[in-house]
Amino acid sequence: MTYLNVNEVESALVVASSPPNDLFTQLIPLPHMTWEGRSVNAIKIGNATGLGRIGVYFLGGIHSREWGSSDILIFFIEQLAQAYRTNSGLTLGGKTFTAAQIQSIVNNLDIFVLPQANPDGRNFSITVDAMWRKNRRLAPTGDEGNPSCVGVDINRNYDFLWNYPVYFNSAAPIANSTNPCDYQVYIGPAAASEPETQNVVYIMERFPQIRFFIDLHSYGEDILYSWGDDDDQSTNSVMNFQNPAFNGLRGISGDTTYQEYIESCDKALAIGLANDLQSAIQAVRGRTYTIEQSLSLYPTAGTSDDYAYSRHLVDSSKSKIISYTLEWGSPANPTPFHPGYAEMQQIIQEVTAGLIEFCLGIIARHADVYIKDNADDTGSVPYSGVFWDNSDIFVRQTDDNILLSEGALRGQTNYIYVHVTNLGPAVTQDVGITLRSVRYAGTEFVYPQDWKSIDAVHIEPSAINTTFSGIPGGGTVIAKFSLSPAQVETLWNWESGGAHPCLLAEVAGCNDFGSPADVHVWDNNNLAQRNITIVTVQADTWITFPFLVGSKHNPGDTVELIFDRKGLPEEAELHLDVFNRTIYFRDIKTAAPGRGYKSIVAYEGMELIRHNRRQMMSLHEPQSKIILLKRPRTLRQVVLLLRIPGRDKPGEVYRVRVAQVNAQGLVVGGVTLEVHATKKD
């Protein structure tokens, strides 16, 4: 046998994603063609779809001369698929996996494999120059005759400290070059300039459930974890790759002038999974791979592993990806980049065993910590019920440990409890709960913007008890926050101006891998909200309840609202004023395109009336809906007017729910008005 050629790798992917494997595999054509016009494919292995799944991404073939990476990943795909399909175990040298373990991987994980990211370079290396490393970008004008001026090192082209002369100490022994004619490590004309780089990134962008990443390279028998630009440290978060104050200082190992910040739990997790990878590799034939930080080889910039891990730090809407570079092949081999195929077959088996054990380690360590969106919420996603007025977030006037929400009391400190549950199976490690109180939000909330901001609209309650070292499977904890009298006044200032406070909570655990970023409350069980206004009024008194609909992050020009008045007495009067131009919400610009009736697209279960000489809608059916025009990326103000009949008993509680739905009919948010009736004077 010999190494697969470029066409054979692509053909193997097509076969692996064809019947009978097509029930649990999917071929993923990548959008960017290479410089020589080749198309590239990846494959997804996973026997389920939907939110809450954990993605694992294996990459190979970045460096042209490292022929074996593509062969390893094709073997991995074929062995995993066959064992799963036949419900059988798998033996690789001295390492055996049971059928149940193989079933667990494919049933619980989404595995993405891109085995041949740089087919142009690999083809050139196999057929012309065995030591070729780069892709085949055309040489710059004037250098067409120099074969070394062709190509870019893809693993120096990612958008992480790419422009390394700005960021690194001039004395750092960094293996990068800005010279297009550098035979090995030319970084390219711009970050992510190459189609091969763009294809690698495309998979991370398209599949936000990806939480783990391994890039296969040779040689060295190493398992490398982040970071590669400088020594790791977990004590000073200010010292990080985004801080320009440290430009020109990076890349000197062993000094303390600059060291790259990494969360301690992320580093512990990375090393723990690396140990799993190492042990399985060793079990095959006794080879011991070294686990170490990427910097241990030499400082680097623009690499795939550091880019993958850095994404969530640059943009909080990106999911955190624990990432590695795995260097297969012994330095003692006279041809370590492409050893004889008998030796390569041994390497293929040991690395495949390591990748399978890595997947099992993820499953074993996973803990699913969540905040209930509703009393009936089991933690599954997406959550399709009402998720904003009965969540495990509770307002209390005193710190009495009672998990029952009540209206805030002005003029004093109030308390907010967040009840957190761990579904397991593992103990959740390093749990942290954050909370925002939004002065007035729309009916559609967006993560992370509405969670991360602290400004005139987004208030940060003071933390009392919000971090926990561990929550066992099936266990619960209560996080506590306080709102100062001034914060309460800002949020509940009905007399001084419009306000409709919403509480937004997030829980994160170091080993909770199942909730990707940049999703909404209903499809991320780490997020929860309480969007309910509680008002105590006398019977027979009209309540004016202004609130905002839509989201300033939504580019649509309409908003559909569903009103549920089943929680009201039949005789209660409920009106909707969508034409009111009174400014209830300071600091928020609201506008409707078109005046009066022209701003309504359609409505059901309501009728147009005049009330107090104003035009508005009367909501008389148990459920009604309306579609309103709005300006893209703006909020629109609407006003509910409610009167509870005087004959109703004092102390009775009534609710009106308003839900916003999208074009697919999915509820994306809402608001609830809760009325506590008192006796009329």
Image (cartoon, helix red, strand yellow):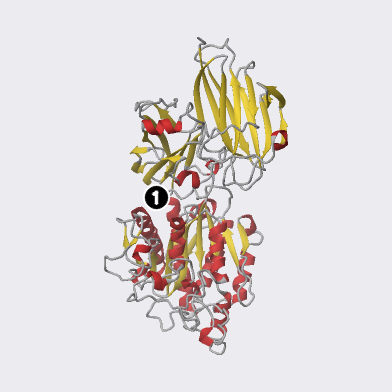
In the image, 557 versus 623, the foreground residue is 557
In the image, 538 versus 512, the foreground residue is 538
Q: Which percent across, then down, holds residue 295?
A: 35, 69
Q: Which percent across, then down, holds residue 31?
A: 62, 65
Q: Secondary structure at mark 1?
A: loop
Quarter of the image where the N terminus is located:
bottom right
Please report the residue visible at 61 percent of the width from the left and 37 percent of the height from the top: 660
Q: Residue 268 lies in what quarter of the image? A: bottom left
Position of 356 with respect to 23 (left or right) is left
In the image, 37 versus 541, the foreground residue is 541
Compared with residue 472, is residue 544 higher up or lower down, i.e. above or below?
above
Q: Which percent across, then down, holds residue 427?
A: 38, 45
Position of 196 with respect to 598 (left or right) is left
Residue 290, can we see it?
Answer: no
Residue denoted by label 1: 510
Judged from this view, the residue extending furthest toward the bottom is: 145
Q: Residue 541 lies in what quarter of the image? A: top right
Give neighbour class at mark 1: few <14, some 14-19, many 20+ (Cα, 10 Å).
many
Q: How many marks?
A: 1
Compared with residue 117, is residue 620 higher up or lower down, i.e. above or below?
above
Amino acid type, residue under disc 1 in the picture? Cys
Please report the residue visible at 54 percent of the width from the left and 47 percent of the height from the top: 519
Judged from this view, the residue extending furthest toward the left is: 255
Residue 260, can we see it?
Answer: yes
Q: Which percent across, then down, holds residue 143?
A: 54, 87
In the image, 633 versus 421, the foreground residue is 633
